[in-house]
Image (cartoon, rainbow, N blue to C red):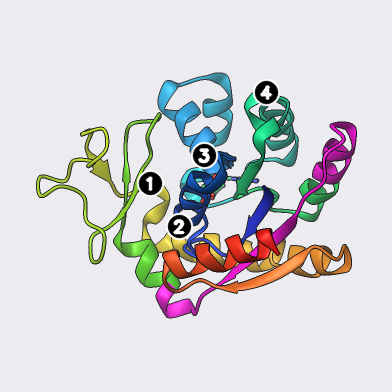
């Protein structure tokens, strides 16, 4: 499948991308995961991105397009991809369209994940993420906790609260989402590519998306 997951921070994009990838071997690609790995590894990209990320601001479009052009050209993407957290601005959406035309591939659709604000806030404050850059598994201390000692069930590294999950950074991320990313809903609607999905229980949302892919 070739799908863009759209939705506010905490709408469930990361969890759903990983579950959908198990369905047909499409690769889940999260710009947030790529950037967090770069920050951890202290690369040039990480140094440039860190300040924006910690405050919940968007990393400049030019850096994001460089990363995504390189990533989408990798051979594993031929099986399909699930984009989580990209595009996040109208500029990125237009550039993605150009890039996919160059690669001669088409999106199946953009899945817009909808969840009420109180659920989103609760998910963001109770989320824990594996600190291993190659894993970054997502947990939730209420309904999907890591091991009792706080370690990741998959790779046994510690899980942690992300630097951008402070109350202040969360408020900023939601504000930026409404200003810069929510307009993509209208953009993809005009392109005839938008499908809306309620994102309350991940397994249910994944089934609905799979149905839409197979239809
Ligand atoms: P996420 O894990 O998707 O919530 O992303 C975490 C942070 O990485 C965001 O708050 C931004 O600072 C940065 N980021 C991720 N994807 C993008 C993108 N497509 N454009 C700009 N910044 C991004």
Q: Residues within 10 Å of mark 1 (few under 14, many from 20)?
A: few
Q: What separation in Å lies between label 2 and label 4 (alpha carbons)?
A: 36 Å
Asked whether the beta carbons under mark 1 and mark 2 sit within 8 Å of each other, the answer is yes
Q: Position of residue 63 (x, y in %)?
A: 69, 32
Residue at image mark 2: 169
Tag shown at residue 163: 1
Q: Please tell me which of labels 3 and 1 falls first in the chain.
A: 3
Query: Which residue occupies 42% across, 51% down?
Result: 164
Q: Residues within 10 Å of mark 2 (few under 14, many from 20)?
A: some
Quadrant in which the C terminus is drawn? bottom right
Left or right of 87, for residue 172: left
Q: What separation in Å lies between label 4 and label 1 (alpha carbons)?
A: 32 Å
Residue at image mark 3: 51
Q: Is residue 81 magenta?
A: no
Magenta-highlighted residues:
95-119
Q: What separation in Å lies between label 4 and label 3 (alpha carbons)?
A: 32 Å
């Amino acid at each position: 499948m070739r799908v863009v997951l759209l939705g506010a921070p905490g709408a469930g994009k990361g969890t759903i991308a990983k579950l959908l990838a198990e369905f047909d071997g499409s690769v889940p690609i999260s710009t947030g995961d790529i950037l967090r790995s770069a920050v951890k590894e202290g690369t040039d990209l990480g140094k440039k991105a860190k300040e924006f990320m910690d405050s919940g601001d968007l990393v400049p479009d030019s850096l994001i397009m460089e990363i995504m052009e390189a990533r989408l050209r990798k051979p594993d993407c031929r099986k399909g991809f699930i984009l989580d957290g990209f595009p996040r601005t109208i500029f990125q959406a237009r550039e993605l369209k150009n890039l996919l035309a160059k690669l001669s591939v088409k999106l199946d659709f953009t899945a817009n994940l909808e969840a009420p604000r109180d659920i989103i806030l609760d998910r963001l404050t109770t989320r824990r993420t594996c600190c291993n850059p190659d894993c970054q598994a997502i947990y939730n201390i209420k309904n999907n906790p890591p091991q009792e000692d706080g370690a990741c069930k998959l790779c046994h590294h510690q899980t942690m609260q992300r630097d951008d999950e402070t109350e202040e950074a969360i408020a900023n991320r939601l504000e930026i989402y409404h200003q810069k990313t929510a307009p993509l809903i209208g953009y993809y609607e005009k392109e005839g590519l938008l499908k809306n999905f309620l994102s309350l229980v991940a397994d249910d949302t994944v089934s609905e998306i799979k149905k839409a892919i197979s239809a």
